[in-house]
Image (spheres, rainbow, N blue to C red):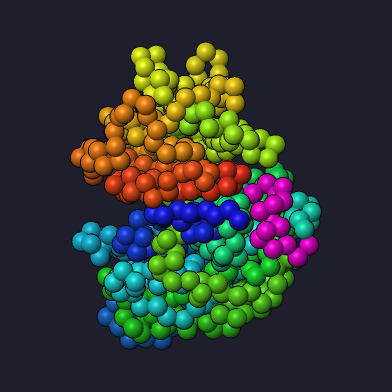
Amino acid sequence: MSRHRAPSKPPVGRILALVAGLVVVALAVVGAIRLLSGDEPPGTASDGGDPGGGDAASATAPAAGDCAEPEQLVVVTTAAMATPLEEAAAGAASDCLTVEVRARESAEVAQQLADAAGGADPSDADVWVPDSTLFVELLAADGVAVGAGDVVATSPVVLAGPAQLIGQAPEGAAWPDLIGSELPLKGTNPRQHAPSLLTLLSAQAAFEGDAAGGEALAATMVRLGQDLRPADELLEMATSGEQVVFPTSEQVVHTAGGSLGALVPEGGLGTLSYPVVTLPDGDASAEAVAALTGALLSPEGQEALAAAGFRPGEDGPPPGVAGVPEQVPALADQFTAAEVTAATESWARITQAQRMLAILDVSGSMREEVGDDTRIGIATGAAEEALGLMRSQSQVGLWEFSTDRGPDGQDHRQLVPVRSLDSVSEGRTHREALRDAVRSITAETVTGDTALYDTIIAAYRLMQDQYDPGYVNSVVLLTDGVNDNPEGGLSEEQLIAELEQLADPDRPVTLVLIGMGPSVDGGALQRIAESTGGRAYVAEDPADIGPVFIDAVMNRER
């Protein structure tokens, strides 16, 4: 039986399991919270409304009171919740209290709170009503104290799209059905969108312990990451009839008025929960927060929220959206802050543009037959598939190596330089040039011995010399043998010593070594990779190298 081993880090499919690139973030820890905001500007994560910082409105219904001047309570919440919350909060307003509601997305608020804990300017709000209790848990895990109160509304997460398209989805679909289907999945950055984050976490849970399913999910994540869209843009596309399916909330589908359909995979996608959170730097009195909470939970307040498509309270009646069950598990309760952080970090790593030099072993042993193919045929097939999963902004180059391969007797030969995949030269894109170069490597072209160690040091030096801080910089090398250089060359000890001397924390280059076949010395690959903080993978059965190679290419780090 074949075995996959990743001595220094297991494949991504086992660490992570996400679904099609998806959900509004719920990350808000001083370290994890920064993942939430990523490099995207605030306001791209609205779930069907104007981005954060929008209009403010005051509820001023008079009531009995005796005060020198009214207290002003500033409440921030998501764009989708802002108007109904303003209406529901009217019952709290009096001669002694005014309530101002401002639209600001949860990731933006969480980032601001984390920054304030580190000494930045505090929030200008008193109360926060985020769209997930995960924000509170993540902040608390990082020592940012916020006072979480009652949940005033909920809304299950769904996959939405044009009603006719959703009607074609497999009945009673589970995650494996959806991953293997042809549904046109699109997503929003899960570091910026809570529904997408919960979708990611639920997919991860669904594929726990399923290596093959996890690998398929990782590939889906990468494809989603190539074309992320703001949530409001996906909503507009779907309501205009474009064939897209994306993560959102039941409330958004309800508001669309029948133009959208909803799909909830078996096990659910979790539920958005809207708690009343007292902010640490706000000026709100306990009485004012209690008055607001009471107004939101009053029959009139709950009616206002229900009219907007939210489920009132923690277990209110659903708005009757087809395809959404009455009872939906609140999956957020099943995940720890550490699990959420790990998932979002993996997402960021897998979908980030990279600068990579790929190197393929073309020594004579790569002609060996494996079933109806050869080792080199399997390797080039895996390389071509991985190439198709990379973001167009990535920079990729290709070498081949054996012995005496280069024009001046080098053991390696450059087939294609490191360039952006979307760059164009001589009428073709760099991605197409790479594909053609990979296809040019056949069983008829492989020859020579395996000058492995000299090739590794040459590649590492090149990528460090050309280091670009805007990318994940890496060397990914595949071989089917041990170091075998008739000219002598470096020993393992000499190679490790040189790599350790070259290693520079200001110019980190990830070294990823992949072995295929029973002749590989997995221990040597691991020792060499770990000397620079890299990773080694081994597929003892060459037929298994496809998913191992793709996983190694995609699961890289700075």
Name above or below for residue 327 compared with residue 191: below
Judge by depth and name the residue closer to the eye, 520 or 33: 520
Judge by depth and name the residue closer to the eye, 287 or 380: 380
Judge by depth and name the residue closer to the eye, 485 or 143: 485
Q: Quadrant of residue 29?
A: bottom left
- Write the residue at 57% across / 47% down: 541
Does the magenta stretch mainly form a helix, a strand or a loop?
Answer: loop
Q: Position of residue 546 (x, y in %)?
A: 58, 43
- Write the residue at 64% across / 45% down: 237
Range covered by the magenta-colored residues: 171-185
Name above or below for residue 412 compared with residue 5: above
Residue 114 shows in this picture = yes
- Residue 8 colored in magenta in the image: no
Left or right of 117? Residue 302 is right
- Write the residue at 49% across / 28% down: 363
- Residue 174 colored in magenta in the image: yes
Q: Residue furthest front?
A: 486
Q: Position of residue 397 (x, y in %)?
A: 44, 28
Q: Position of residue 306 (x, y in %)?
A: 62, 73
Left or right of 457? Residue 353 is right
Judge by depth and name the residue closer to the eye, 23 or 242: 23
